[in-house]
């Protein structure tokens, strides 16, 4: 049974084509991420020609003779049994209307066959400052209601965290379709740290808060270089993710966040809480705690300069460190500064959050009690490395010791053993 609303729209489109003889494909430039093939343009003009001939009362047979279009093909068009990509866009254009030149229409959802299913929003082709992003966020609706969105944390904050996390560990696969490019996000986090499950669920929540489906999938098996399996989440593919990648992060389709710097200076114009959530997304992905140096750090290559500016805008002083083994730059900061901000999300409380908390709240002995010293020596004899032992003692005793003291004790233990 035909949909009456669809029939009415088809009739209005036909009338629109008839009364606009100069109609061309320029209207398609108002849709984000759409690339017409030569075939699409040709089909568009064939279709509009058929509509005009039909309005003049010509039969399908006569139209086929005049245009050279197969009769069966144009009958599909005439009787609305089939529609072409460009005409479906014309229908959306007719319904949505014109927008300002600097903006584009974007459908969050689409089928594999290229049918845009909405909801529709308008997005800028370039971002000048945070206000441009805020206007887009105001149009997005969460898929499900949640406690964070209502009680604790705003949609803008969730988006900021999502953006920061995208720069780090997540995979952002571009999917090239016939007339458009979409993109999806995949997050894989090691089961070695159980709190990573909460991190992945939070990233999924962030995606859901802006209308994107993102779900937990079957865990990925361990690889040759990593003995632990991975928690896994995968989002839908969407032009919205492509827009975030291309416009919000300023990256071309062939670029990778691992090697290519983002172009997102607009973040510096965002509210303080937005900048904090952005840093948290990045830190929960690429942050670490160095117990030996008593510092917190974030791997920032290739965006060290921008991340340094954002941290400085939050009154966080940093120093640069270069890791020779991985050829990566990091920004280091005092643990108290990292914990006070905090750079690790306080709702998730990942293992890194507890590491920086324990580092800041740890007791320190000027002179080690006898029993405490004996426990450290016992652990040394069990073969723990310096860093492993620092973490173990901190977790079990709440006391921070240094690798320097451990090395001295280890040397003493070795000398006694030789005797």
Image (cartoon, helix red, strand yellow):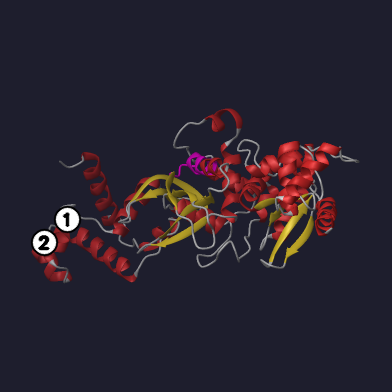
Among all residues in the image, which is located at the extreme front? 419
Q: Which mark is residue 381?
A: none
Give the labeled residue for mark 1. 78
Q: How crowded is mark 1: few (under 14 residues within 10 Å), some or many (20 or more)?
A: some
Disc 2 is placed on an element classified as: helix
The quadrant where residue 56 appears: bottom left
Locate residue 402 relative to residue 140 in the image: left or right. Answer: right
Quick one: 389 or 182, which is closer to the camera?
A: 389
Residue 231 at x, y percent in the picture: 49, 48
Q: Do the residues labelled 1 and 2 touch (CB within 8 Å)?
A: yes
- At x 62%, y 35%, the residue is 347
The quadrant where residue 299 appears: bottom right
| Magenta segment includes 175 | no
Residue 376 at x, y percent in the picture: 78, 45
Q: In this view, does 338 lie above or below 61?
A: above
Alpha-carbon distance for marks 1 and 2? 8 Å
Looking at the rendering, in which quadrant would you find the C terminus?
bottom right
Residue 344 at x, y percent in the picture: 67, 43
Looking at the rendering, in which quadrant would you find the N terminus?
top left
- At x 58%, y 27%, the residue is 151
Give the labeled residue for mark 2. 60
Q: In this view, does 370 lie above or below 235?
A: above
Q: Residues within 10 Å of mark 2 (few under 14, many from 20)?
A: many
Q: Give the range drawn in magenta.
A: 202-213
- At x 55%, y 29%, the residue is 150
- Which numbered disc, 1 or 2, marks the residue that appears first in the sequence? 2
Q: Can residue 314 be seen in this view?
A: no
Disc 1 is placed on an element classified as: helix
């Amino acid at each position: 049974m035909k949909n009456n609303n669809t029939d009415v729209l088809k009739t209005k489109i036909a009338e629109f084509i008839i009364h606009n003889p100069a109609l061309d494909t320029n209207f398609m430039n108002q849709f984000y991420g759409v690339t017409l093939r030569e075939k699409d343009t040709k089909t568009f003009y064939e279709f509009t020609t058929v509509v005009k001939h039909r309005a003049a009362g010509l039969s399908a047979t006569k139209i086929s003779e005049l245009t050279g279009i197969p009769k069966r093909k144009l009958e599909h068009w005439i009787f609305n049994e089939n529609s072409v990509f460009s005409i479906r866009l014309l229908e959306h254009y007719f319904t949505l209307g014109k927008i300002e030149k600097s903006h584009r229409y974007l459908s969050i959802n689409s089928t594999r066959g290229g049918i845009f299913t909405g909801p529709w929003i308008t997005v800028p082709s370039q971002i000048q400052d945070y206000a441009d992003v805020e206007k887009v966020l105001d149009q997005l609706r969460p898929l499900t209601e949640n406690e964070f969105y209502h009680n604790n944390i705003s949609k803008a904050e969730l988006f900021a965290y999502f953006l920061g996390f995208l720069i780090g560990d997540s995979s952002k696969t571009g999917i090239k379709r016939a007339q458009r490019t979409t993109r999806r996000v995949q997050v894989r986090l090691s089961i070695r740290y159980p709190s990573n499950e909460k991190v992945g669920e939070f990233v999924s929540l962030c995606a859901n808060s802006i209308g994107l489906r993102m779900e937990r999938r079957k865990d990925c098996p361990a690889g040759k270089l990593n003995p632990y399996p991975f928690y896994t989440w995968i989002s839908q593919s969407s032009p919205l993710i492509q827009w975030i990648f291309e416009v919000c992060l300023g990256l071309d389709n062939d670029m990778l966040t691992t090697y290519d710097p983002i172009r997102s200076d607009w973040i510096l114009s965002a509210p303080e809480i937005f900048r904090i959530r952005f840093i948290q997304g990045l830190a929960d992905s690429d942050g670490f705690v160095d117990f030996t140096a008593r510092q917190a750090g974030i791997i920032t290559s290739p965006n060290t300069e921008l991340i340094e500016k954002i941290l400085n805008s939050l009154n966080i002083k940093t120093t640069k460190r270069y890791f020779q083994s991985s050829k990566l730059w990091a920004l280091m900061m005092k643990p108290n500064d990292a914990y006070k901000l905090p750079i690790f999300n306080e709702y998730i409380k990942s293992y890194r959050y507890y590491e920086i908390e324990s580092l800041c709240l740890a007791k320190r002995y000027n002179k080690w009690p006898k029993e405490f010293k004996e426990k450290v020596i016992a652990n040394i004899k069990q073969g723990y490395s310096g860093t492993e032992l620092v973490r173990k003692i901190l977790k079990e005793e709440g006391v921070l010791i240094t690798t320097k003291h451990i090395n001295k004790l280890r040397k003493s233990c070795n000398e006694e053993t030789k005797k």
